[in-house]
Image: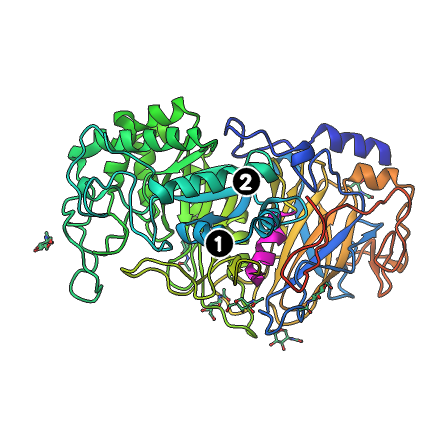
Amino acid sequence: MLLTSLGLTLLLANSVAGQSIEGLGVSGGRGPRGGIGDDAHPVRRPQALITDAKIPIAPNTTRQLAPGPAPRLVLHNRTLSTCDNRRAVLIDSSTGGAQQEMLGFGHAWTGSTVSVLDSLDDDVFVQVMRDLFGQEGNNMNFMRHTIGSSDLDGNQYSYDDNGPSFNQGEPDLELANFDLGPHGRAMAKMIARMGDVKGDVFLFGSPWSYPGWMKHNNLFIAPNLNEGSYSNIMNNSFNTKYIPQAIQYFTKYVDAFRDHGVTVNGLTLMNEPLNAQGGYPCMFLDAADEAAILAQGLGEEMHNRGVKVMAYDHNTDQPMYPLRVAQGAPEYTDMAAWHCYQGSVANYSVIQDFHYAYPDKLQFMTECSNYLPEAGSDNWSVAQNFIPPVRYGASGATMWVMATDPDFGPHSPYGGCAGCLGSIIVNSSTTYTKTNDYFMVGQFSRFIRRGAVNYKVLEGVEGTTYDPNWFDLIAVKNPDMGWAVVFMNNLGSDQDVVLSFTAGGFEWEGTIPNATVVTWLLPSDQIVGQSGVLPQASGTAVSGTGTGEGRICSTTSSVASSSSAPPTSMLEPVPHTTHTIAADGRSSGVA
Ligand SMILES: *[C@@H]1O[C@H](CO)[C@@H](O)[C@H](O)[C@H]1NC(C)=O
Ligand SMILES: *[C@@H]1O[C@H](CO)[C@@H](O)[C@H](O)[C@H]1NC(C)=O
Ligand SMILES: *[C@@H]1O[C@H](CO)[C@@H](O)[C@H](O)[C@H]1NC(C)=O
Ligand SMILES: *[C@@H]1O[C@H](CO)[C@@H](O)[C@H](O)[C@H]1NC(C)=O
Ligand SMILES: *[C@@H]1O[C@H](CO)[C@@H](O)[C@H](O)[C@H]1NC(C)=O
Ligand SMILES: *[C@@H]1O[C@H](CO)[C@@H](O)[C@H](O)[C@H]1NC(C)=O
Ligand SMILES: *[C@@H]1O[C@H](CO)[C@@H](O)[C@H](O)[C@H]1NC(C)=O
């Protein structure tokens, strides 16, 4: 009977009901250059990895991707009864519960990132790239980069300023002076080195502004944002007479990056198209104009180059924008991109709404920054902006920004995020520090493989992002048919959890400590079944009718494999999961 149900599980292997990641120009991230949970690196024993929400005051004083007590196998289905207060977590593991395929998680390449990483000695640079992209590091798979400068860049430029500076050039109708320039070339060269560490990362570009001469008022520079220049849409907006030039600009950018060995897989036409602050590196782009640029040739040029188009790239409070782009250029709108800055908490249910309208289009959370988080306080910024988007249908998420200097820079002299905390702080040519967000992103990017399928969570979530305290989770089935379950526990106390699946198979139990993000790695039912360690029941079945029927009341729950029991020969440790931090900020081991 056990074998029959396992055979069935294999037959139903990762069938996707929702959006698929086929045809994105990336291989699937499997094999030697994939990582934990792909079919070449199956998870062989249950594990828990923990990062505390508290930002440590001193190094090594909190858990950061630390191994915790492993989840334990339970014999009986739905072992909860009225006689215990464990939290029932139920995943719809049926075909109908299968949602979107996952692409990955990451952090953004910015001018600041490139300049601070360029200042490292080469052996230290190689190590930080392994920490970010290696299988023993965060193994990031979904990467954004800025096209031209952003607010996190010490210099202001586009790839065709055609004048004394950004925002001050003459029209260059043939794009004769298109040039990545020193900063663009430095970024392309550094991004190309991701390939030294791992295979094909999904990379997408986003401009903060088009060249100044493509805007209505390229002379308008307001160093002081308070002097009446705020939200000057009429001035700081795209002039549609330059649509042919905008199309050329993007095609030349994709080709120039390709010439540096970088494959661009995705494009947003404008970062934050509704942001028009004068003087700031930004530009207003109406949804109708975004669709027009696509329909009048950019969509075709991008598709010819294998580049997917991502609509919108701004906050969840204007959900009509990507719908209007998709209506205006349906065949060229491949994806929708969302940011987190809607008040204090983003409302990610818009992802589900967009999905109902366009069920085949992928969606992503493409930008969120953690602003001046304080040592000693709890911070949920990453989990709060990764878990709900995925639960509502996003195939990945990326934080802003990847690396800065200790003063959160360099950033734009005309304003710009003066407190955006990255994942890496470069202290000197030989020293860098991983922030708590590095480990928080790792709770996702290390364990959720490309091609994993997100499944519906039916029970277990309590509260919402709008509540001061809440408990949330996502459950994905990796290509190895094992599960990665990421929990966040902001309820104020430890939560004892029993995890079960509607389509049967093994159940797991364990504790999600107070104020943590925890990832459980669960081997596939097939591996557990082959392990020769059959689950043993302890506790007593409750007989009778009603809610307690057939359930177990137990304090000493059944255990097949736990942190205290040595693993059996079949339940081998997974390589490359744990992480130690050396005093100089380097991790041990080699990718
Ligand atoms: C555009 O900016 C200029 C200043 O350079 C200002 O005089 C003008 O009123 C602005 N136009 C609009 C429509 O806001
Ligand atoms: C979130 O957006 C949904 C629509 O997707 C809406 O029904 C709901 O009221 C919004 N919630 C809040 C708290 O704004
Ligand atoms: C993270 O820390 C910052 C700075 O203390 C705070 O403003 C923000 O609300 C925190 N975010 C979350 C989600 O905890
Ligand atoms: C690097 O700079 C950050 C921010 O100032 C600081 O918290 C950290 O302790 C520094 N690390 C080292 C090794 O000096
Ligand atoms: C849980 O964590 C929160 C935030 O760190 C803390 O205030 C609270 O006292 C903790 N609860 C328990 C029961 O330890
Ligand atoms: C759990 O129950 C389902 C049906 O309710 C059954 O198909 C499955 O085999 C059971 N799993 C175990 C491990 O007993
Ligand atoms: C942090 O922990 C690692 C691994 O246990 C150790 O090698 C390192 O020296 C510690 N760093 C500090 C600053 O205590």
Q: Is residue 436 magenta?
A: yes
Q: What secondary structure is the magenta-colored segment mainly?
A: helix
Q: Quadrant of ligand 6?
A: top right
Horizontal side, residue 412 vs residue 29: left or right: left
SS assignment at label 1: loop
Image coordinates for residue 279, horizontal then vertical, percent: 22, 56
Image coordinates for residue 312, horizontal then vertical, percent: 35, 43
Q: Is residue 312 magenta?
A: no
Residue 63 position (above or below residue 173): below
Residue at left offset 43%, top offset 52%? 115
Residue 39 position (above or below residue 377): above
Q: Which quadrant would residue 306 be assigned to in this image?
A: top left
Farthest top residue in view: 304
Quadrant location of the C terminus? top right
Q: Which residues are magenta?
A: 433-446
Kindly identify which numbered label has been placed on residue 119. Answer: 1
Residue at left offset 52%, top offset 47%? 106
Q: Which residue position is annotated with label 2?
A: 194
Of 387 and 121, which appears nearest the observer? 121
Horizontal side, residue 152 vs residue 562: left or right: left
* Distance between mark 2 and mark 1 Cα atoms: 17 Å
Q: Residues within 10 Å of mark 1 (few under 14, many from 20)?
A: some
Image coordinates for residue 202, horizontal then vertical, percent: 51, 37
